[in-house]
Image (cartoon, rainbow, N blue to C red):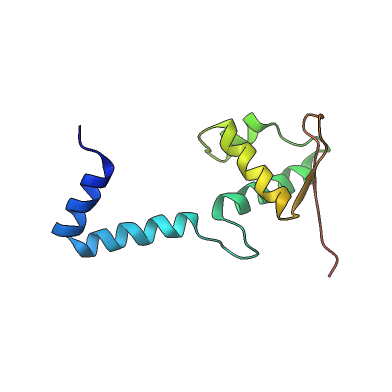
Amino acid sequence: MTDISTVARDLINTDPALAAEVHRQILAKTASIGFGLTVKEAAVLEYLRDRARESDIAPSFEEIMVNLDIGSKSTVHRILTALEERGKIQRLPNRPRAIAIVEKAA
């Protein structure tokens, strides 16, 4: 089996334009989209806002994972932790589904 670094090296040597496009697309998926949020973080925040409008109950990690096509609950946890560190949400410790969206006053 060939490892990813060998494939990447071969791609760069044989087709630098394609390698540059792949790199651009990878950066676009992980880049910040404003206010220091990644695309996934912004999507989760928007989903939380939508759910808050519909219900007083925050979504579970499973619901976030399924509705936003996120691969694992640990990724959801990482995204929520990042949103909390950036001051976008607030979570209460030891309470399930205790997520509040922090709206800054303008």
Rendering quarter of residue 87 = bottom right
**Against 89, is 20 above or below?**
below
Q: Residue furthest left?
A: 14
Q: Residue furthest bottom?
A: 106
Q: How many marks?
A: 0
Going by the image, does 19 lie left or right of 74?
Answer: left
The foreground one among 49 and 29 is: 29
Rendering quarter of residue 20 = bottom left
Q: Quadrant of the C terminus?
A: bottom right
Q: Quadrant of the N terminus?
A: top left
Task: Indicate the position of residue 27 as horizontal and vertical percent values.
Answer: 43, 59
**Against 57, is 90 above or below?**
below
Task: Indicate the position of residue 45 as horizontal and vertical percent values.
Answer: 68, 50
Going by the image, does 8 lie left or right of 52?
Answer: left
- Tell me which residue sits at (21%, 63%) in the image: 16
- Tell me which residue sits at (59%, 31%) in the image: 73
- Tell me which residue sits at (49%, 55%) in the image: 30
The foreground one among 47 and 1 is: 1
- Tell me which residue sits at (21%, 58%) in the image: 12
Task: Indicate the position of residue 38 as horizontal and vertical percent values.
Answer: 57, 55
**Against 2, is 100 above or below?**
below
Going by the image, does 46 lie left or right of 4?
Answer: right
Going by the image, does 7 lie left or right of 48?
Answer: left
**Against 64, is 11 above or below?**
below
